[in-house]
Amino acid sequence: GLFNYKASRKGVVTAQIQYVRINGGALENNAVAYQMLNGLALGNNAIWTLTYQVSLSEYLQMSLQYDGRKSEGHKAVHTGNVSLKAQF
């Protein structure tokens, strides 16, 4: 599901959660399969994203993003990203 929340002048928060079930008896456990499946594994998988975007000034925007994924039988993988955009 997808959830958006916007508070005036305080930014926008977006959250997304996905459930993915992969059935692939012919897929092997190798680098090509890993790349094709975007790091997900056979079986049940969960993917989530949380993003916060805010305008710091008329010309400057900041974005914070947290991503996670959890595959059946594997530890969760967490990543984060911060970006700053200047428009001139």
Image (tube, rainbow, N blue to C red):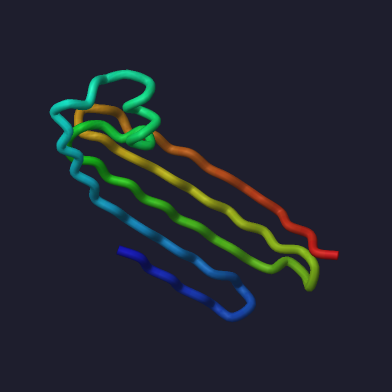
Residue 61 located left or right of residue 37: right
**Residue at 54% across, 69% down:** 12
Residue 55 located left or right of residue 21: right
Where's residue 56, x and y in %?
73, 66
Where's residue 2, x and y in %?
35, 65
Where's residue 6, x and y in %?
51, 76
**Residue at 43% across, 71% down:** 4
Quadrant containing the N terminus is bottom left
Please, is residue 35 above or below residue 12 in the view?
Answer: above
Residue 5 located left or right of residue 86: left
**Residue at 59% across, 70% down:** 11
Please, is residue 44 above or below residue 14 in the view?
Answer: above
Quadrant containing the C terminus is bottom right
Please, is residue 51 above or below residue 29 in the view?
Answer: below
Splitting the image into 4 quarters, where does residue 38 fall?
Answer: top left
**Residue at 17% across, 26% down:** 26
**Along the viewing direction, whichever of 25 and 50 lies nearer the viewer:** 25
Splitting the image into 4 quarters, where does residue 29 fall?
Answer: top left
Please, is residue 17 above or below residue 24 in the view?
Answer: below
